[in-house]
Image (cartoon, rainbow, N blue to C red):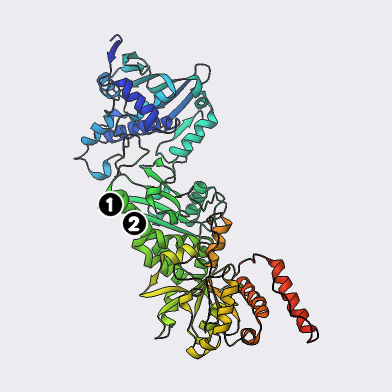
Amino acid sequence: MSSETLEFKTELAQLLDLIIHSLYTKKEIFLRELISNAADAIDRLRFESLKRPELSQGKTNWKITLTPDEKAGTLTVSDNGIGMTRLAIVENLGTIARSGTRAFLEGLKAAQAEQRPELIGQFGVGFYASFMVADRVTVVSRSAEPGADAVQWESDGKGAFTVGDAERGTDVILHLREDAREFLQGWRLKEIVHRYSDFIDHPVVLGEETLNSRQAIWLRSKTEIKPEEYNAFYKQLTRDDQDPLKTIHIAAEGAMEFRALLFIPSHRPWDWLMGPQKKSGIDLFVRRVLIMHECEELAPTYLRFIRGVVDSADLPLNVSRETLQHNPLMGKIKANVVNRVLKTLEEMKESEYETYLKFYDQFGDNLKEGVGQDWNNRQRIADLLLFESTKTEAGKFTTLAKYVDAMAADQKEIHYLIGETRQQLENSPYVESFRAKGEEVLLLTDPVDEYLVSALDRYKEKSLKAADRAEAGESVDAATVEKFKPVIEALKAKLAGDVEDIRLSARLKTSAACLVAKEGQMGAHMERLMARMGRLDERGAEKRILELNPSHPAVIALLNADDAKRETWGRILLDEAVIAEGSRLKDPAAFARRVNDLIAAIAAPASAAPPSPA
């Protein structure tokens, strides 16, 4: 039959423009689509051959071949699959968004489930991604039907196509544009195949080299896979040179079917990002083909340290394959993934504590993020957290559950203190009263702890309370308050510009003074973090409350001091409180002068003049 020119059956110009400029964000996607179509064609022939062996004629050497021709400027993608008749080419390639694969799937409904090939080309537009890189596409195909002739289809994507006779097998020939000649380079083709089609069941061949590994081990039974195979796959997937800390192999069947192979790394990977740039470490596959790299819909952000793959044959895709439809199945897969990861961590913490400590050292901060991100699992995540405290040795940990179990009956709150180091916190004046009462204080030293305590306000009906808040202190008896009233009033007058208020407190046992924040006010540690990030507003640091210990000799000395000494000594006590909370003095030189004057006054004769306030 001679060649004939036919019109496309839809508004091709508008649809091709949509496909080329909107559906796909990367030009290289065209090769993924063509390889997937070729794999579908092979699977269809294999399936049909179960009923009609004459179709395959004993062929078993299934493969997909890439042939770049720099001189001609063409890239050919060939397969030895089922092929198309003249009518099939006109119907499938002459109608946008119509796919022989989709029609074929409709015909499989009555087939046995285990005999059905897994095909992904359901929307009939992937082929047209070819026009992102080619100004002309030629398809040469011979149907597997006995006696069928080879048919040639050709189009420049501008409203018409030509169908004629041919003498070759099944090829898709892309006549590449000048700006797409990179896809003639072997290294570029290898890179794309490895990224998107590495686990396709059939070999993808360039020259004599097979480019894809074809080792989709997540589809195999767990009992068939050796630990060294898991480790090798992890290293292939992540480029990590160390074995993973833990492997999670999921084979969900029934109403929700998917496979997943997930890994907990033994250390933070080289590309680790704590910020919003990296939100996932899990790739989404559909029937072995990569659909989305680092898919954010498979796990919440706090689990971005998890590396691995999820593969589902049931996920419906939109026409681009790059964006998933809003489908309940994705939510179910995500919930299953989260549950299995948390269960693995719970088991590790319970029965492999030393291994869990290694994990927590690297990724504990992520779990603390999860308390605020994952409301449904907040309690489970909180139970996975580890804390140092005033009752643990340095480098040893307790948990919230242990803390609550050890609380006295009259203790109503879980106490914590946030700061830079354990040494600073355990020597802080804020823990003195709790230590005296035998109450434990959690010592939090990670930057993310501020976020944690804002998200986890309660645990097992016990509220979390910062030890450096004004409400955490203890009141002083009325007689002592009256006794120190002149001192407090004098200091308030002199230090009004530096503090919110001055008062006596029984929280201090060995220290003379401390600064505390009001309920709802930013604490000293958070204030320091905000300052480092340049996030403090124009008002700067908020004023805090100066608390004095009425039983301390330095505070008692203020009772008999004159106004000048009260101001000087009061400022020294204020500066000491700033240092004790871990903050920097506004004027270290002035503090040094006051201390030096005090030393000099003590050493000088009694007749020496009192030091002047600075």
Q: Residue 609: give x, y in percent of width and height.
A: 77, 80
Please report contact status of discs 2 and 1: CB closer than 8 Å, yes or no. yes
Is any atom of residue 197 visible in this view?
no
Question: Does residue 237 sit above or below 425 in this rendering?
Answer: above
Picture quadrant of residue 76: top left
Q: Secondary structure at mark 2?
A: helix
Q: Which residue is mark 1?
A: 256
Q: Residue 149: give x, y in percent of width and height.
A: 30, 17
> CA separation, marks 2 and 1?
10 Å
Picture quadrant of residue 574: bottom right
Q: Residues within 10 Å of mark 2 (few under 14, many from 20)?
A: some
Q: Residue furthest top?
A: 2
Number of the label disc, if any, that sits on residue 151? none
Q: Residue at x 35, y 37 (%)?
A: 321
Q: Residue at x 59, y 77 (%)?
A: 491
Comparing 372 with 397, the one in front is 372
Comparing 491 with 43, the one in front is 491
Count of numbered badges drawn on the protein: 2
Q: Residue furthest left?
A: 110
Question: Does residue 204 sit above or below 398 in this rendering?
Answer: above
Mark 2 or mark 1, earlier in chain:
1
Q: Is residue 557 left or right of residue 22?
A: right
Q: Which residue is mark 2?
A: 336
Q: Residue at x 46, y 35 (%)?
A: 193
Q: Is residue 309 left or right of residue 240?
A: left
Name the residue type under label 1: Met
Q: Residues within 10 Å of mark 1 (few under 14, many from 20)?
A: few
